[in-house]
Structure formats: C-alpha cells, structure tokens
Image (spheres, rainbow, N blue to C red):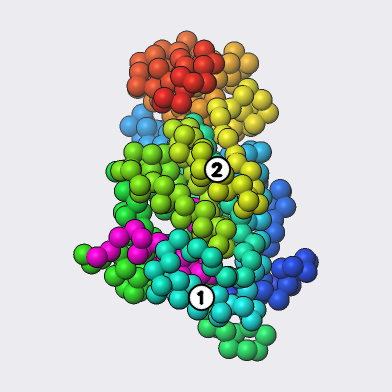
Amino acid sequence: MSKNPNTGVIVEARYSKQQLKEYSGNPLIEALPPIWSFEQVEELLHFYPEHTNEERNYEPHIRFHCVQRLFSYFQPWSTHFDIEQRISRVIRQGYITRNPLNPNYAGDLQRIYQMIKDGNYEFKNSELSKPSASGFTIIGFSGMGKSTAVESILNRYPQIIFHEEYNNFDFDHNQLVWLKLDCPHDGGVKGLCANFFMEFDRLLADKTYSKFAAGRNTTTATMIPRMAQIARRHSLGLLVIDEIQHLSVAKSGGQEKMLNFFVNLVNTIGIPVILIGTTKAMSILQGEFRQARRGSGHQGDLIWENMEQDDDWDLLVEGMWSYQWIQNKCELTKEIKDVMYEESQGIVDIAVKLYAMVQMRAIATGEETINSDLIKRVAKDNLKLVRPMLDALKSGKKQEISKY
Ligand SMILES: Nc1ncnc2c1ncn2[C@@H]1O[C@H](COP(=O)(O)OP(=O)(O)OP(=O)(O)O)[C@@H](O)[C@H]1O
Ligand SMILES: [Mg+2]
C-alpha cells in the first residue's frame, strides 16, 4: 500500500472471497475492503488526539497549540454509521452491472463512444445494459460535519486499485473507487467539469484528460459525455459532489444541465452519485430534478439538521471533554452540558470551536478553569457572526434557518 501525498490510498488489487453471490466473480468488488460491521466502522472512523495530564502544566503559549488538537478529534455517531452503510452499498451495487469481465462491458463502452460521436449528449435512447447504480443527497446545516463525515469514510477505501491479473488471466485495469469534487464558488458548471478531468489526471498521474477541458470549442455539452466515458472506463465507483448549493447561483441553463447530467450518470451510465449541500441547495433539488430521480431506485435522501440533546450529542460532548489543557480540570456537569447545547444549538462545528475558545480564554486570563458563566461570555464575544443563525435555531423557525 502506498500513499501519494496528493491522493487517497493507492493499492494493488487483492481479491477476497465474497459471502454474497451477487458480489462474487466481480474483480471490482472483490478488490474492495470487506463490508464492515458497526463496531469496525466505529473503530475505523474515530480519531482521538494525543493528550496527557502533564501537558496541563506546560506554559500558556505552548498550551494554545495543544488546544488545536481538538479540531482533529472525530467521534462517529449514528448518522455516520448510516452514511457509511449507504456508501458501502452504493459502491458495490453500482459495480454489479459494470463487471469488466461481463460480455456487455466492451459493448457498453463502445456505445458510449458512439453516443459522443453522434453528438447524443443527453444519452437519449441509449442502449447500455441496465445499470444497477443509485445515489442519494445529504442536505444539512452548515457545520454539521457533512464533508468531514463523507471524507473520513471515503478515506477508509483505497482511491485507486491497480489490477493486473485476475484468476490467472491478464486483467490490466485502473479502478478509481471514488472521486470527490467541490462545486466552484462561482457556480460554474464548466469549472466543475474541468475539475473532474484534472482530478482524473492527477490521480492517474497522467495528462490525457485535462485536454478535454481546454480548447476554445469546449462546452459543457462536449465535456459531459466525455466525463461519462472516462468514469465508465476507469470503473469509477462513486462520484461525490460537495457544496452543490453553489450551483444555485449558476447562470441559467448550466445548473439544469449539470443536474441532468448527475441523473444520467446514475440512471444511464450507472455511476453512483452523492450530492452534498447546505439547506440552501434544497430549492435546486426539487421540481424536475426530483422527478427525474424518482425512477432511479435511489437510496432516500438524508436531511442532517442540528443535533438534538440526545445520546449522540452526549457521545460527542463527553468524548470532547477529556481534551482539556487548563490547569484545573473541569468536570462535565449537566449544567455545563446544557449551556454548551444552548450556545451551540447542536451545531457540531460551533460546539467544538466554542470549547476550544473557552479553553484559550481560560488559559489567557489565568482563570485556568471552565464554568458555565465563562462559556456564555465567550459565546457572546466570539459567535457574533453566527448569532442570527443560532437565534433562528433557538426560535425553531425552520424557514428562517435556511437563509443562513
Ligand atoms: N464527528 C465529529 N466529531 C468531532 N468533530 C466534528 C465531527 N464532525 C465534524 N466535526 C467538526 O465540525 C467541523 C465542521 O464540519 P464540516 O466542515 O464537515 O461541516 P459541513 O456540514 O460540511 O459544513 P458546510 O456545509 O459548511 O460545508 C469540522 O471541522 C470539525 O471540527
Ligand atoms: Mg462541507
């Protein structure tokens, strides 16, 4: 196993026997890691940073640095298990009908090539073998951990698998298990397509595909079918597009074309797609796009709102609480837990940042302890920018919230 600093993990294919018949005899699936149990997922995903009691006695300017470790703390909870399960399913299911050893494989590639030649950019009346792919969307408030969740799960899968020989037959194939792209800030569809080609080249250490994004005559209409073709040729297991709320500000036409493309990618080309965005993206996912996805056997969408004060919240806050670099240890009382919830409204990003800021303040002022009063003061002074959103959450006005 090697790790290129610019990419996920690159591995050589090792095939493992599959318990399920539908996954057997498919090198793309047999080369994946095993289907993990919940316990394994918890073990693989959590990250508990370094922390020793001795560090509490370090000088303040050193301890400020220790506090930064909080941001690498990662505690999975039920939502993460759900997302991991879905990802594990869509990758494998999507590969079922794209087995390179099936007789239809070459024919399908040929037909995609033909569609491009014919200028059939919408893949109308295409006669590819019936795809088994499905996808889903994750929509939720900013700072809930959507990107972190998906990235940490994807990083447990190799990103590229090199195949050379399968069952004593030559099988020369570069399998790209997943690709994650962010929608550009200007909402430009062309930019997104260009990123797609560049990512492929970067991952495969090649320069072949970037040229599809260059040139004066390049349009989204010419790029989209090429993307489909490349995705198919390299057995792309999963395409993740983050920040899709940016699509909503795109110039007219582009957004629709892109959404159509995502649907086609799943329904016609057979590549699973996960779309991630804030609640702002809700409007662009409704209407026609929703209709188009209906038939695609997709996995149901995941709405990720702020956390309730439930077991998951307790798990997150209790786990985080052991990372203290103040001299007088502060126990997590019910009162403090309530204040943490009140001030963060169950937004993970804010909870973690607030806890870090509280410690920095306690160290800087020499208070060296945490109490609910300090948490409130720090929240008041430091969360000014997100205050309107937090107030909207407190008031429970969902309509208001989507503004932020
Ligand atoms: N499971 C977790 N355990 C601990 N901290 C977490 C966890 N998930 C997220 N965080 C914290 O929350 C921060 C925000 O997460 P992330 O950027 O993934 O949110 P997001 O939902 O993608 O937000 P946006 O919609 O703005 O992109 C992370 O930087 C991390 O500090
Ligand atoms: Mg994000």
Residue drawn 52% across and 12% down?
Answer: 395
Query: Residue 283, image x and y in percent?
Result: 47, 34
Mark 2 CB within 8 Å of ligand 1:
no
Asked whether residue 232 is drawn in magenta, I would say: yes
| C-alpha distance separating marks 1 and 2 | 27 Å
Name the residue type under label 1. Arg
Does residue 215 appear left or right of residue 190 in this picture? left
Q: Along the line of sight, which residue is nearer the eye, 155 or 245?
A: 245
Among the 4 quarters of the image, the one containing residue 387: top left
Locate the C terminus by quadrant: top left
Label 2 secondary element: helix
Q: Quadrant of residue 364?
A: top left
The residue type indicated by label 2 comes to Arg
Does 248 appear above or below 95?
above
**Residue pictured at 64% horizontal, 43% vertical:** 300
Q: Secondary structure at mark 1?
A: helix
Q: Residue furthest top?
A: 373
* Residue 374 in sight in this render: no
Residue 22 position within the rendered picture, expressed as x and y whole percent measured from the top left: 74, 68
Residue in the foreground of this view, choosing between 33 and 46: 33
Q: Is residue 124 above or below residue 50?
A: below
The span picked out in magenta is: 217-240
Q: Which residue occupies 62% across, 64% down? A: 131
Q: Which residue is mark 2?
A: 290
**Farthest left residue in view:** 216
User: Label 1 belongs to which residue?
Assistant: 111
